[in-house]
Amino acid sequence: MFPKNQIGKAAMLLVLSGEGEEQDRLLKVLDESGFTVALGRVGTMDSQKIVAAVETAAKKNGIISSERYREEHALYHAIMEALLGVGRGVVSFGAQLRTVGLRFSIVRGRPYASPDEGEWIAVAFYGTIGAPVKGWEHEALGIGINHM
């Protein structure tokens, strides 16, 4: 079982683990704990494309339904919160002449013991941000958590 109250930690560990045995073990534990997960990558100077990539992954993996506006809305807020972390308070990367190359994870589930707390969603980004010149980037990490 994954520890309760730690859906954000789960998203961060997934995005930081990369591909391989560590990620596979974590995916198995999260699945056994009732969480739904999606992973992906995105590289762009356009924050709208980042949002679209995460939303598409969430829909393709059954994390949210396009027929439920509240689910899309909760995911959007988690994405924007995570992007604020990556961009140090800025989400318009292209307008700032910055580019990002990011891995992302999306985790949805019931992280609290009480069923009354409902479902939550977490989005984590990890990768690089910098001037659009190869080799001038630095690491960045962002996390967003929202109730469904």
Image (cartoon, grey):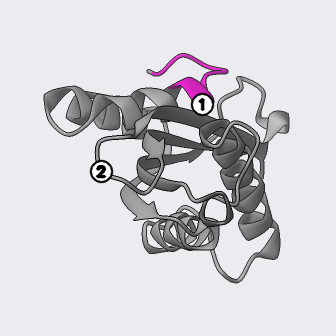
Disc 1 designates what residue? 7
x and y, in percent, of residue 71 in the image: 74, 65
Q: Is 27 situated left or right of 104 in this image?
A: left
x and y, in percent, of residue 42 in the image: 41, 61
Magenta-colored segment: predominant secondary structure: loop
Quadrant of the drawing holding the N terminus = top left
Q: Is residue 94 magenta?
A: no
Query: Judging from the image, what secondary structure is the residue with disc 2 in?
Result: loop
Nearer to us in this view, 1 or 65: 65
Query: Judging from the image, what secondary structure is the residue with disc 1 in?
Result: helix
Quadrant in the rendering for residue 98 = bottom right
Nearer to us in this view, 67 or 123: 123
User: Measuring 71% from the left and 26% from the top, which residue is drawn there?
Assistant: 112
Quadrant in the rendering for residue 48 = bottom right
User: Measuring 58% from the left and 59% from the top, which residue is drawn there?
Assistant: 97
Magenta residues?
2-9
Disc 2 designates what residue? 134
Disc 2/disc 1 C-alpha distance (Å): 34 Å
Q: Is residue 8 magenta?
A: yes
Tell me if residue 121 can be seen: no
x and y, in percent, of residue 36 in the image: 48, 49
Residue found at the far top of this picture: 3
Q: Is 11 situated left or right of 142 in this image?
A: left
Amino acid marked by disc 2: Lys
Q: Is 70 situated left or right of 49 in this image?
A: right
Nearer to us in this view, 95 or 141: 95
Tell me if residue 1 can be seen: yes
User: Measuring 70% from the left and 54% from the top, which residue is drawn there?
Assistant: 91
x and y, in percent, of residue 47 in the image: 62, 65
